[in-house]
Amino acid sequence: MTPKTGTDAVIADMIEATHGQGLSAREQYVYREALLSLVRLAKSELVHEIKTNVYKLIGSPITLSSRQRVKSGQNTERNFVLVQQQFEFNRLD
């Protein structure tokens, strides 16, 4: 298998360094897929952490897209100022 991305290349190198050529094609596939699953899990955890930090920063979840806010006639600049006043400083997680 020719690595397509940086992640694929690192995983291929890890398989080679760990097991050399001693694995069958099926064992290499299973090992590669297990490592890819860990990468996907780490990415989803990172996205969740970023969303949690954004929620803490602005104080309310982002529920409407900018297009929906414009259609609903809300004054986005006024709402932005109100949200900015709700920072959560000096608070332990």
Image (cartoon, grey):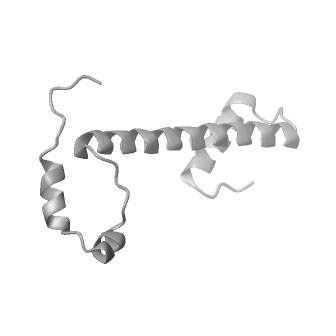
Please tell me whether residue 13 is drawn above or below residue 78 in the rendered image: above
Give the percent coordinates (x, y) of residue 6: 55, 51
Q: Which residue is at 11% across, 46% downward? A: 85
20 left or right of 71?
right
Left or right of residue 57, residue 16 in this image: right
In the rendered image of this protein, does residue 44 appear above or below residue 64?
A: above
Q: Position of residue 43 (x, y in %)?
A: 51, 43
Q: Residue at x 66, y 37 (%)?
A: 35
Q: Nearer the viewer, residue 53 or 16?
A: 53
Q: Quadrant of residue 75?
A: bottom left
- Quadrant housing the C terminus: top left
87 displayed left or right of 9: left
Residue 38, x across and y down, in percent: 61, 36
Q: Residue at x 17, y 40 (%)?
A: 87
Image location (x, y in percent) of residue 27: 83, 36
User: The N terminus is located in which quarter?
Assistant: bottom right
Looking at this rendering, what residue extends furthest in the top direction?
Answer: 92
Based on the displayed image, in which of its 4 quarters is residue 20 positioned?
A: top right
Front-most of residues 29 and 80: 80
Could you say which is closer to the camera, residue 25 or residue 49? 49
Figure label count: 0
| Quadrant of residue 5 within the rendered picture | bottom right
Residue for point 37% across, 43% down = 50
